[in-house]
Amino acid sequence: MGKVIGIDLGTTFSAVAHVNEYGKPEIIPNADNHRITSSVILFKDGSVTIGNVARQHARSGPEQIVEFVKREMGKSKETFFRTFDSKDYSAEELSSLILTKLKQDAEAYLDAEITDAVITVPAYFHDAERQATRNAGKISGLNVLQVLNEPTAAALAYGIDQLGYEQTVLVFDLGGGTFDVTIMKVAGSKIEMIATNGDHRLGGKDWDDKIIIHVAEIFETEHGENPLQDLCAYQSLQFNAVNAKIRLSHQERASIACEYNGKTTLVELTREKFEELTAGLLEKCRALCEIVLSEGNMTWADIDTVLLVGGATRMPMVREMIAHISGKKVNPQEVNPDEVVALGAALHGTLHQISENPSSTTDLPDVVIDRFFGQDGVPKITVTDGATHNLGLVVLNSLREPIIHVMIPKMTAIPCEKEDIFRTVEDNQRSVLVEIVQGLEQGQLTDEIDVFEAYKLGECTLELPQGLPEGSPVRITYSYNRNQLLEVTATALSSGDARGIYDLFSVIKRPTLDAKEVAQAQANLQSLAVK
């Protein structure tokens, strides 16, 4: 294991960091000497360009670019793909191109080959989205040490200099496309997740879209045409809307030009009007804060510090709202919302490297090891994540109605393993169907769950021997690892010959690429020049 990097793979911007020779995390600038990289992909002339150049090209060649791909992670290739040069690209493959660019920039800056990384994801990402992120890392040539929750990374970057001071931290993470609220406890040498909730389709892009729709409606009123019907006009308006949003964080009004079919409309948007247009989005954020406090059995009085993470938290309306409802000073020590997640991922990667593979630390300076470990060899800091969704299965109640039984409750410390004994319901029952679900509540009737299949991770069938009486025991074991990926084991206890063990690849029927498809995608990437 060589140098470890931490990557914040974002919806609109991404960042990469490492721990320097003094044990301090620092951002790695990209080839253009920018500290963050636009998560936009441009396919042109047989090569791939990532970053600001791609973003600027969106207005003149929108059909050649891909953006906001993080929102599509976890979807099957049939559900979401983009086609360039007669090749279909899944969300994982597209994200791998961004990761490849970040990896290349890190290698150039550090003058070293990079193989190992910690990649962050929203805490509220489901199983498939996490597996898709791991796949993207593998396709890009990275050994993904861990898929780490973004608020955990942010709390680590903040908390590593706060050890010894007990405090409860609320991480308000509003990025370009996702939103999480997480409560973390910093106590002694420990950082622990207490509660989390979120919406992985709420972010700065939704504020942009409100501006775009508002301006388009004014244009249509003036000219009788809808500019959003043209891809070039849309991309140009989107670019102008984003710039206006940024300007409104520092001034009271901003002008937005919309051009389509030889006609132009200039809209002057005030901060007051912008806040009026997006009030519903802000209310969603506020409501989720209250939900997380309730889930953690806390009130704002129990919160000591509020960390604002993600570029969208720079909007004054967000800062004012969270300061008003919390009564707290936000972002102590001027935490950089664009960088703190990548910095925390780098810290976690180095901590993982020293803890899990001590023999790999021979090249690390003593000051780095001393920053993370005491003289007794015990880590100075431990990070405990929690399961961000209930994990369970379908069982029959006394009326033989299918209901949800939760095996691993939300916020159970991970990694963890839980097992339970279930009973057959008939004499000579020949099989047991184990249906694995995520995100459902104890005792829910499956017939009353809208779109039940959306919560189902997979299923496996355990064959039973002949002649078993009703009530024969079957043991189900759930193992949940640090990446929040699940392995399920089903065992018939009545016979040593009837044993079914199913690993996470055969049980969990994820819509993501399988191992063979990941290997093929990795091979295909070698023919693409990424810059």
Image (tube, rainbow, N blue to C red):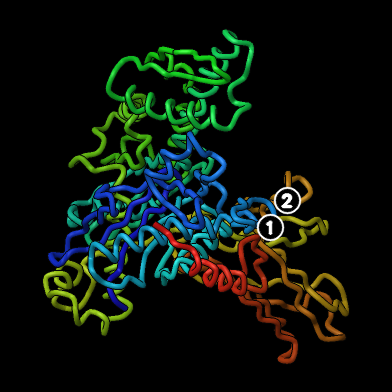
Quadrant of the image containing the N terminus: bottom left
Query: Is 119 placed above or below 518 here?
Result: above
Query: Is 212 placed above or below 203 here?
Result: above
Mark 1 vs mark 2, CA separation in Å: 7 Å
Q: Which mark is residue 452?
A: 2
Residue 30: percent from the left, percent from the top? 29, 53
**Observer able to see residue 477:** no
Q: Residue at x 74, y 91 (%)?
A: 497
Residue 85: percent from the left, percent from the top? 60, 55
Tag 1: amino acid: Lys
Question: 125 left or right of 324?
Answer: right
Among the 4 quarters of the image, the one containing residue 498? bottom right
Tag 2: amino acid: Phe
Residue, disc 1: 456
Circle 1 crowding by C-alpha within 10 Å: few under 14, some 14–19, many from 20: many
**Farthest-out residue, top:** 222
Label 2: element kind = helix
**Observer able to see residue 81:** yes
Among the 4 quarters of the image, the one containing residue 435? bottom right
**In this view of the protein, which residue sits in the foreground, 245 or 24?**
245
Among the 4 quarters of the image, the one containing residue 413? bottom left
Question: 35 left or right of 125?
Answer: left
Q: Residue at x 57, y 15 (%)?
A: 217
